[in-house]
Structure formats: C-alpha cells, structure tokens
Image: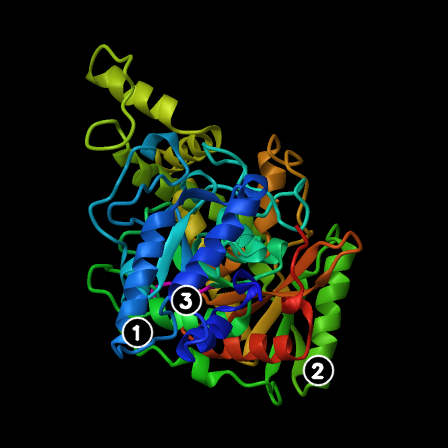
Amino acid sequence: MDLWNLTLFQLHELIKKREVSCKEVVEAVLERIGSIEEKIKAFITIRGEDAINEAKELDQRISRGEEIRLLTGIPISIKDIFCTEGILTTCASKILSNFIPPYNATVVERLKAEGAIIIGKNNMDEFAMGSSTENSAFYPTRNPWDLKRVPGGSSGGSAAAVAAGESIASIGTDTGGSIRQPAGLCGVVGMKPTYGRVSRYGMIAFASSLDQGGPITKDVRDCAIMLKAISGYDPRDSTSVNIPVPDYPDILTDSVKGKIIGVPREYFIKGMDEDVEVSVRNALRLLEKMGAVIEEVSIPHTEYAIPVYYIIATAEASSNLARYDGVKYGYRSPYAKDLLEMYMRSRAEGFGTEVKRRIMLGTYALSAGYYEAYYRKAQQVRTLIREDFSKAFNTCHCLITPTSPTPAFLLGEKIDDPLKMYLSDIFTISVNLAGLPAISIPCGFSREGLPIGMQIIGKPFDESTVLQVAYAYETHTPWNKIRPKL
C-alpha cells in the first residue's frame, strides 16, 4: 500500500486504528518526494528530519492515549507565502531569500494545533504574481500529468505536490484564482473561501482586499476537513469575520436534489477549449439527472473583470511591496554607495520581472491625476460585479463555470506575453472581486489526457453549499481517483 497515494481521511482512519504510525506516513511521503521531486520541483524547502521527529513525538502521545484528531500525523505542505517560525519563508523571491520569520501565520498555528506535520514549503510565482509558477526566482514547477506543461499558478507548487503524492494536502492562497486554477490544471480539489473566513495574519500580502488562503486536496472530503481546521475569527486580522464556522465534513451528502444551479452565459466564451466546454456541460447534465435544476443566468459585467482586477491588485501590490527596501530584512544590495542607491538597487536586484511590472502598473494607477480615472473607477465597477452575483443568487443556490478556459499549457508558451497569461484567470478573477467562496473540482480530461476543472461558486459564507454540490458530483464520478503516472 502506497501511503502517499491515500487521502487525508483514509490515512486518518489507518492512524486511528493503529494500523500505521505517524512516522510511517511521514517517511512514505518523504520517500515519494525523494523519488520524484527532481522532476516536479514543487518545493522550496523540505523538512525531512524535523518532520520525522515531530511524527515520532505524535506517536508517543498517541501511545499515551492522547486524542487522535483528523489531522494528527498528516504531512501537509504550505505555500511559501505563509510565515513559519524558524523555517525559511521566501515568497519565491530573491528579496526574501534569507528571511526566517520569528512567528507562525494563524493558518499554520491552527494546522499544528490539529496535529498536522508541515512537510515543507511549496514553490510559487514570486509574491503570488502569476498563473504558471514560472515566475519563481528559483525554478519553474512542472505539471505531474505532463512535465512539459505548467501546473498553473500562483499556488502551482502546492497543486503539483498534492497531485503527485508529495504532500497529502496543502495550503495555498488565492488572489485572482491562484488556488482554483492550478487545482484545475493538476486534477485536484482547490477551494477559495469567502473573504474574511480564513485569517490572513502571517500571510505575506499581495493585494490585501483580494488575498485569501485555502486548501488544496485530493478530494472534497479532505477539503472540508482542511477548511474546518483553518477557518474562524482571528482578532489579529482586521478583515477576519466573527461568525460561526460550520462543521464542514459533517454536512457532506451525495444529493443535490432541489438545488438550483446557475450557469452564467458569459463564462462560455468564444475561443475556449472545446474539451473544457464539453466536460463542464457533461457535468451539468449529470447534476441535472441527479435532481438539480439548471438555469442560465447573467453576470453582465464579467468582461470588465480582468482590467478591474489588474488595476486594484497592482495598486495594492505597489503599496504592500513598498516595505521591501533592504533596510529591516530581506535582500540588501552590496553595491550601493548611499541610502537612495541602496533602496533602488535592492529592489531592482531583488524583484523579478513580473513583480516589477505590477509594482509599476499599480504605482501609476495610484499616482496624482490618475487615481480617480483608474483606481476609483475600478472600485466602482467592482461593486457592479458584486451586485451581478447578488442578483444571480436571488434565484440560485450556487453557480457553475469552467475553472480555466484551457487545460495546462506548455512551459514557456505564455511567459513572454503578459496579457495572454493574465487571461488564464478570466473565469476565477470575478469571484475574488466579489469576495465569494468557490471551489475547483476535476470534471474530466482533454483528448491529450490533461485534467479539466469545474468551478462551483457560492453565496458569501456559504461554503457548505459549495462543498455539498462538489461532494455529490464527486461521488458520482471517477475523476478524483485518477492519478498521474510519473
């Protein structure tokens, strides 16, 4: 039995029955990493010996009769954007290549409190800016289904690690689709919770009004378990919302009878890959056979989502990334002759091309004379997009769309064409602008054998419905059980 190939819940059952130890699970995952990581490059940091020692300690506590929680002894990877006490945290950037935080992000604290073992930190697009994990300062990550293709981004390392069995589950972040798009391209499950559901404390900021952490897992039950563990109010995060967290694993059922599912007509566009449209349409037909009611709806301001996002996100990035100046922490240029040159050289040498591009775009949008024309106007259109979703939810329990317009594209295919790369997130960006919960689940394969993802979007703080519909569909299909052959 390949322990690395099992789901989180399956491993929990084995540990609970004392059929395997936490140490055996961690060693199996580390062995898997050792055998394929050179091909995938999903990690920046791997915690080998430390993870095994933590597993041994958990085994001793279990032998003394301590409670075995759902995450006890489960090896989990973390996107390298979350602060981890005593563990290198780089954001895949040269400017943070020597940064070791003195504290844990709230998400990390909560996972550790549930007994999870951090197996390592995943590769990503630098500062979460990208859709392919080619913008990492260290190396690109490869898709386990086809090593010539991208895993998506910016949480590409997390999605690739879970798909390849290098991690049982992972935590990523989603600013415009950075959990859902790589989950779709790698054939795994990825969820972006409602803005404010999961604490952002200790999560290095890209665009503060859009960023949200969430789980990437092998199936929907695992996603529900992870979401329950990391959700909840945190007074250290001013955007955290103080409302009860449902027991997500307990609300899962295999029925969608009576659920009204909206299908936004603007999300089936000209130029979309034919295999993607066929797979999602087939999924909708299956849900209808299962008892759901399928209705066409409209999100009329969808066409403005990309320009609105790239004004708001870059403006907030320009502000957030101003702190990296070579003074307090991170990279400092050794060539500067005075203070001003130190600032300029440290940032010029420390940031990659895409990060610089976005900082400049954002600084321009916020500059005197342009703020009203760009940033304020974008925020006004953002409100219209949010209102579009509110109207659709007056008649629907959830919405279903493709996750991405195409399956995974080739490494290098879009890296020199920023606009083409930005369009990879055309179906996911609106959800962040509106602050809604959404999940990507596998719904088929292309003719080339590449995974295709389906996105389910819910009302604010109604992750329960999103998970229920996803779980019901998953129980009637084989897609989540198919693994890449490496």
Placement of 93 over or under 483, stated as above or below: above
Q: What SS does tag 1 mark?
A: helix
Q: Quadrant of residue 261?
A: bottom right
- The chief SS type of the magenta part is loop
- Mark 2 vs mark 3, CA separation in Å: 26 Å
Residue type (three-letter) at the residue carrying disc 2? Glu
Q: Which residues are magenta?
A: 192-196
Which residue is label 3 attached to?
A: 194
Q: Nearer the viewer, residue 163 or 273?
A: 163
Would you call the spot at circle 2 few (<14 residues within 10 Å), some (14-19), or many (20 or more)? some
Q: What SS does tag 3 mark?
A: loop
Placement of 284 over or under 24, stated as above or below: below
Q: Quadrant of residue 45?
A: top left
Q: First in sequence: mark 3 or mark 1?
A: 1
Q: First in sequence: mark 2 or mark 1?
A: 1
Q: Residue at x 74, y 65 (%)?
A: 279
Residue 193 in magenta stretch = yes
Residue type (three-letter) at the residue carrying disc 1? Ile
- Mark 3 vs mark 1, CA separation in Å: 35 Å
- Mark 2 vs mark 1, CA separation in Å: 46 Å
The reply to whether dot 3 and dot 1 touch (C-beta < 8 Å) is: no
Which residue is label 1 attached to?
A: 62
- Residue 417 location in percent, x, y? 62, 33
Placement of 363 over or under 465, stated as above or below: above
From the viewer's perspective, is the residue at label 2 or at label 1 nearer? 1
